Image (cartoon, rainbow, N blue to C red):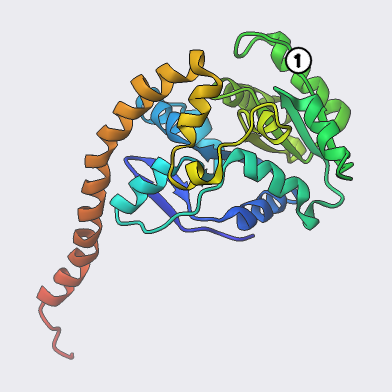
Amino acid sequence: MQTFERAVIGGLKLDRADQDASSRHVLDLARADGGIVVTSNVSITRHLRTVGLPELEEQTSFWTVDGVPLTWLLRIAGKGRFPRVTGTDLMNGVIEHPRSEGLRIGIVGAAAVEAEAFYRARRHDHVHGADLPFAEPGSPELVDAASAFIERVRPDVLFVCLGFPKQEHLILELRRRHGDDGIVFIGAGAAAQMNTGQFPRAPRLLQRLGLEWVWRMGQDPSRLVKRYLLQDLPWLVGMIPVALAERFRAPQAAAAPAAASASAPDQAPA
């Protein structure tokens, strides 16, 4: 199975992989032992660093870079260019990939039924979708409905579209119930809504400029204005010194063994 270069900034893990490599890796995991994939954006990384979700961090095997601001932090930290792989693009990449043949792809949550119809109309008959009841995170009703879908469909990959951290709490509970089934769980937020056209994607120019969040705020202002402007933005600014410290720490760490070797006395032959 392919391995990826992993960067760590302030304890946050991010893997360098483009969309095709990410899609192939998800399918490789599905043919192996399954796992959890996190498409990391600013909101997710902020929550992990400030609130924490240790169980998710321990069980996640693959961290793609979703948010453009995270690619900026990686460059500030001296890690170079990391491709952006959104949950929206990963859903398309996995479903449409030739190597997905013979696998069952499940989608639960917002617009999941519409997503099944959308993909099946494009001859992707291996896609199965189901809505979930509107319920509090971790509620038995929500977990039981998702669990019943798994027992009925037996998906190899399951996209959970509820938004962070609700979808991640559900994923962890489903892993407790179905951990031996080898499922790849992916929290995908609004991916099904975007791919089916309910929430149109931002124009390419805004995506390239890292301004897709402005577009998303206009689509869902009551929920996203507070999150993006009052929570994510201040946290992101506060992460710049952390990234700069990482940039200057790396050369020092690399130089230390060389300096120690140079200062060690030569050993005379016995």
Dot 1: what SS?
helix
- Tell me if 269 is positioned left or right of 31 in this view: left
Where is residue 141? Give x, y as percent: 72, 9
Amino acid bearing label 1:
Asp
Q: Give the residue at x 13% y 83%.
A: 266
- Tell me if 141 is positioned left or right of 253 in this view: right
Where is residue 45? Give x, y as percent: 42, 33
Where is residue 176? Give x, y as percent: 66, 26
Above-or-below relation of 207 to 112: below
Task: Residue 200: name its quadrant.
Answer: top right
> What residue is shown with label 1?
144
Q: Give the residue at x 54% y 55%.
A: 17
Q: Residues within 10 Å of mark 1 (few under 14, many from 20)?
A: some
Q: Closest to the observer: 202 or 16?
A: 202
Q: How many marks?
A: 1
Above-or-below relation of 166 to 196: above
The quarter of the rendered structure image containing the C terminus is bottom left
Task: Residue 146: name its quadrant.
Answer: top right
The quarter of the rendered structure image containing the N terminus is bottom right
Q: Is residue 257 visible?
A: yes
Q: Is residue 62 visible?
A: no
- Tell me if 14 is positioned left or right of 10 in this view: right
Where is residue 42? Give x, y as percent: 42, 34
Task: Residue 132: name its quadrant.
Answer: top right
Q: Closest to the observer: 64 or 60?
A: 64
